[in-house]
Image: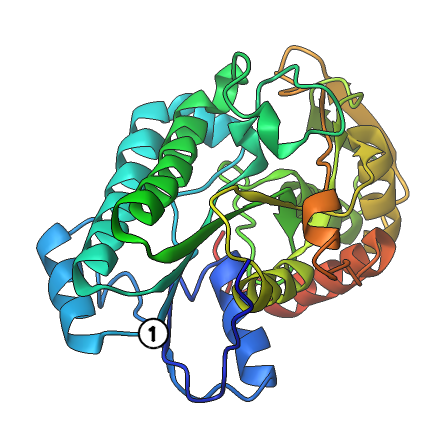
Amino acid sequence: MTPLTLTSETRIFVAGHRGLVGSAIWRHLESLGHTHLIGRSSSELDLRDRGAVFEFLSVERPDVVILAAAKVGGIQANNTYPADFLSENLQIQVNVMDAAAEVGIDRLLFLGSSCIYPKFAPQPIQEDSLLTGHLEETNDAYAIAKIAGIIQVQAVRRQYGLKWISAMPTNLYGPGDNFSPTGSHVVPAMIRRYAEAADAGSTSVTNWGTGTPRRELLHVDDMAAACVHLLNTYDAPEHVNVGVGEDVSIAELAAAIAAATGYAGDTEWDTTKPDGTPQKLLDISRITATGWTPQVSLAEGITRTVAWYRAHRDSIRS
């Protein structure tokens, strides 16, 4: 591996800088003193527009690209709109990476998802479990797009010799998340559901599934720190898992969120709805070997995210 160092003068394009992960990366870079950050909203630059992306990168020519832009959603959204998730994510990835390769941008970090792994991969999931089994059916289209991104990074390294890398985060949550009742992931969906129930004095909340699947949850501020750490330390074709190394059941998560929101009623489970993957716990030995460890506990992260939601719910994506 070749150690690399980002300086305050490094020009960094954060694609998706207003999303959950991108905004956290932007905040973290600013906290480290970076003053040459480049970001464009989707209205300013549609990453699905190939010509616009090529023109943008040829003009800006950043030193580093962090590809955090993606079309994302929870089980319901992925299961309802698989063609959209496949097509739009492929367009975003291919356009940005093709343009970055043409310009000769030496350093790019592609962010994927732990859903790339087989539904029944041995736990904790090691990076070499990729492509060893069938995917979870409810988000296979999104997973295929992210797998394609990993392969493109590896192909560019082989063909052009550029120092591109990939990171696969576990389930992320935190400020800036999507709290939509139909398009969000499990943590923001539950925070909204329980907060609204607590505020309304409701006596019952119903969640999807059985509550038995287990999930690993990483606060987005830890993910942001991991991204910068990898850009400074990691240079290899193999993708890197980013997580916390432990998981909780969905029922345990629901109880923790209920307590954080002040909800004191009952929780019911709609077992006619899908559970998704039974367990998804990442082996994080590759990244911890480089010196990175997560800092935000789940209890602290949930408390902070609930507080952020309540302070911003009138203006956030919903």
Residue under circle 1? 63
Residue density around tag 1, few if under 14, some if 14–19, many if 20 or more, within 10 Å = some
Q: Position of residue 25 (x, y in %)?
A: 53, 68
Secondary structure of the residue carrying tag 1 is: loop
Q: Measuring 50% from the left and 84% from the top, which residue is drawn there?
A: 7
Q: How was the colour assigned to the protein in this rendering?
A: rainbow
Q: Measuring 59% from the left and 64% from the top, which residue is drawn there?
A: 233
Q: Position of residue 115 (x, y in %)?
A: 55, 30
Q: Position of residue 228 (x, y in %)?
A: 57, 68
Q: Measuring 29% from the left and 38% from the top, which residue is drawn there?
A: 90
**84 versus 118 height, above or below:** below
Looking at the image, can residue 47 be seen?
Answer: no
Query: The N terminus lies in which quarter of the figure?
Result: bottom right
Looking at the image, can residue 166 be seen?
Answer: yes
189 left or right, relative to 25: right
In terms of image quadrants, where is residue 272? top right
Q: Measuring 69% from the left and 61% from the top, which residue is drawn there?
A: 222
266 left or right, relative to 155: right
Report the amino acid beneath label 1.
Answer: Asp
Q: In front: 94, or 312?
A: 94
Q: Position of residue 97 (x, y in %)?
A: 27, 51
In terms of image quadrants, where is residue 31? bottom right
**164 versus 29 height, above or below:** above
